[in-house]
Image (spheres, rainbow, N blue to C red):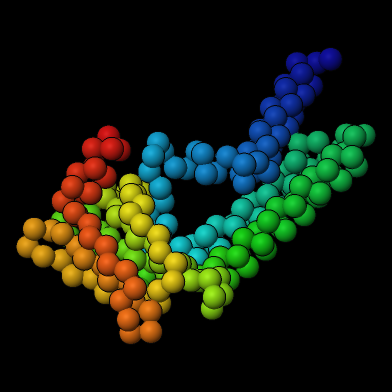
Amino acid sequence: MSQQEKSQLSGSLQERLMWLVLAVVALSVPLWYEIAAQPGEYIFSWRWTEYQVLVESIISVVHLVIVICGFFMLRKAVGDMPQWSMVRLGTWIWIALVAIFALFSVLMFNIAENEVIESYEDEGYKVNFVRVSGSEEDIQIFSVLSCNHTLLYKNLLHLDRFIGAEKVDISVDTDSVMTASYVLDDRVVREQRYDLAALYTQCREGHR
């Protein structure tokens, strides 16, 4: 074998290896995305906001597109091998599973819609009261406090969850104590107080 042929063979193997690595990364995106993209105890900034349904639905569809691209990368890497027919079948089964999961995620995100019904923001933190409704009979109100905000991430404290109210009225006194009144049919069914200063300190110090 001449030096030129050896060089061409080496280049071909390197190219195949590159496409194979890219294919593996693309095909496995749904498996490692959450682990790799969320550092430590941070969560994505759109979680528990009015944008969560839209963003999570888009991400599910993007995952499907990336996995389909991974199939074509894999074909460039091993498409001329005798085992390609079996590899292709397995890959399409995986793509079908990801497609079903993406469709299920989009449907679930739209059924269990998140709506921020009350919000309070002060220096360094924000409190959201999020109504999650799967049906008329299944309405939950979650209260969450977030801090350490960046463009993509934040830390979060789950304060409370209440079932059996349609809205919440909030007030904050001069000592940064929030009173949340959960209301059903114009009647207060529960009242809860939160020391926002202490909760903000807990949010910051608990995630250092």
The residue lying at 36 percent from left, 57 percent from top is: 160
201, 86: nearer the viewer:
201
Image spot of residue 176 (x, y percent): 13, 58
Q: Position of residue 136 (x, y in %)?
A: 54, 78
Is residue 197 visible in this depiction of the protein? yes
- Relative vertical location of residue 123 with respect to residue 20 in this rendering, above or below: below
Residue at 68%, 37% in the rendered image: 24
Specify whether 38 is left or right of 188. Answer: right
Write the residue at 16% across / 51% down: 197
> What residue occupies the far bottom of the structure in this picture?
186
- Name the residue located 75 percent from the left edge and 52 percent from the top edge: 97
Where the N terminus falls, by quadrant?
top right
State how many labels appear.
0
Q: Can residue 121 be seen in this snapshot?
A: no
Q: Position of residue 129 (x, y in %)?
A: 34, 66
For residue 130, which quarter of the picture? bottom left
Task: Between residue 115 and residue 30, name the one nearer to us.
Answer: 115
Quarter of the rendering occupied by the C terminus:
top left
In the image, 11 versus 198, the foreground residue is 198
Image location (x, y in percent) of residue 18: 66, 33
Report whether 16 appears left or right of 151: right
